[in-house]
């Protein structure tokens, strides 16, 4: 009976350690435009079927000629997402919101594309189009120079530090309970326990971040996350074997396998429920 109580405590801790997804936590694209002429419109170009279209009067208060230029654009299968529509619903602003010296455009909701181009039309009806851009994060910011139509995206230290702190605290709680469960909670094991968790979570977060940007969220969750977890398991087992105080190798092996299996489930729950933090 005591064993079942301990296992139920671990399951309950997992439930407490993962968040509830915010209702407005949708995939998004933020575009910050520099060196742009005033009065321009910006839209995303996509190569996809049109399932959802904006209403006829949605842009009735905008410049009719500029809107028509965007509607008429159709090259190599690419058309304007907001003005003409796409395979999913997207909420966005074709007119930039000025923030200092830049103009900001925000596009979000379920229809945000993974690949797109950016098109700009100015008041003289001249158009500029960027190269194909691949979205690699759940919520991503791009920086567009309107003079050359070159696009960059930057990595912030918070992109890695916040997921690291979340996973580290989660693993310290969950694997700490496992440490108690397998009767390994000794003062001598405290430092290697914290160190191994810190090292493993640094590897996990950095790996997921860069793989996510290269292969996308779905491939990362289905293929790469299990791979990284196995890699982390091996590292923690080697550290525990060398630096932990334990009775038998079987004891330490069971602890590492069980602790990492539960932590893997918890990590997956975090990433599924709060993808904007990790991707």
Image (cartoon, rainbow, N blue to C red):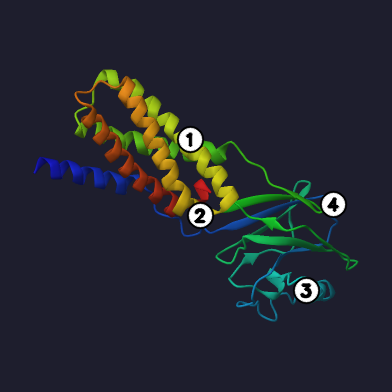
Judge left or right: residue 268 versus residue 136: left
Q: Earlier in the sequence, mark 3 or mark 2?
A: 3
Q: Is residue 191 above or below residue 231?
A: above
Q: Which of label 3 and label 1 is nearer to you?
A: 1
Q: In this view of the protein, can residue 40 be seen by the observer?
A: yes
The residue wearing badge 1 is 203
Q: Outermost residue toward the left?
A: 1
Q: Which of label 4 and label 1 is nearer to you?
A: 1
Label 3 to label 4: alpha-carbon separation: 21 Å
Q: Earlier in the sequence, mark 3 or mark 1?
A: 3
Q: Dot 2, crowdedness within 10 Å: few (<14), some or many (≥20)?
A: few
Label 4 sits on a secondary structure element that is: loop
Snapshot quadrant of residue 200:
top left
Label 3 to label 2: alpha-carbon separation: 31 Å
Label 4 to label 1: alpha-carbon separation: 37 Å
Q: Which mark is residue 74?
A: 3
Judge left or right: residue 226 versus residue 252: right
Q: Dot 1, crowdedness within 10 Å: few (<14), some or many (≥20)?
A: some
Label 2 sits on a secondary structure element that is: helix
């Amino acid at each position: 009976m005591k064993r079942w109580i301990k296992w139920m405590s671990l399951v309950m801790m997992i439930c407490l350690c993962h968040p509830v997804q915010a209702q407005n936590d949708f995939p998004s694209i933020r575009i910050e435009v520099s060196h742009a002429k005033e009065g321009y419109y910006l839209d995303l170009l996509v190569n996809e079927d049109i399932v959802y279209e904006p209403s006829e009067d949605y842009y009735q208060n905008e410049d009719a000629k500029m809107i028509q230029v965007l509607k008429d654009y159709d090259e190599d299968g690419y058309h304007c997402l907001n003005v003409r529509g796409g395979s999913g619903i997207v909420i966005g602003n074709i007119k930039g919101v000025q923030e200092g010296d830049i103009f900001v455009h925000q596009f979000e909701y379920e229809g945000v594309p993974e690949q797109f181009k950016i098109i700009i039309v100015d008041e003289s009806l001249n158009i500029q189009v960027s190269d194909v851009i691949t979205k690699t994060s759940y919520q991503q910011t791009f920086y567009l120079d309107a003079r050359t139509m070159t696009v960059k995206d930057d990595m912030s230290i918070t992109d890695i530090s916040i997921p690291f702190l979340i996973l580290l605290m989660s693993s310290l709680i969950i694997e700490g309970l496992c440490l108690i469960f397998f009767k390994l909670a000794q003062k001598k094991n405290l430092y290697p326990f914290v160190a191994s968790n810190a090292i493993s979570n640094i590897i996990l977060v950095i790996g997921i971040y860069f793989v996510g940007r290269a292969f996308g969220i779905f491939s990362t969750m289905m293929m790469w996350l299990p791979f990284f977890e196995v890699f982390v398991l091996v590292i923690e087992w080697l550290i525990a074997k060398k630096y932990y105080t334990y009775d038998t190798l079987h004891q330490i092996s069971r602890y590492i396998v069980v602790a990492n299996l539960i932590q893997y489930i918890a990590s997956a729950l975090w990433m599924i429920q709060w993808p904007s933090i990790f991707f």
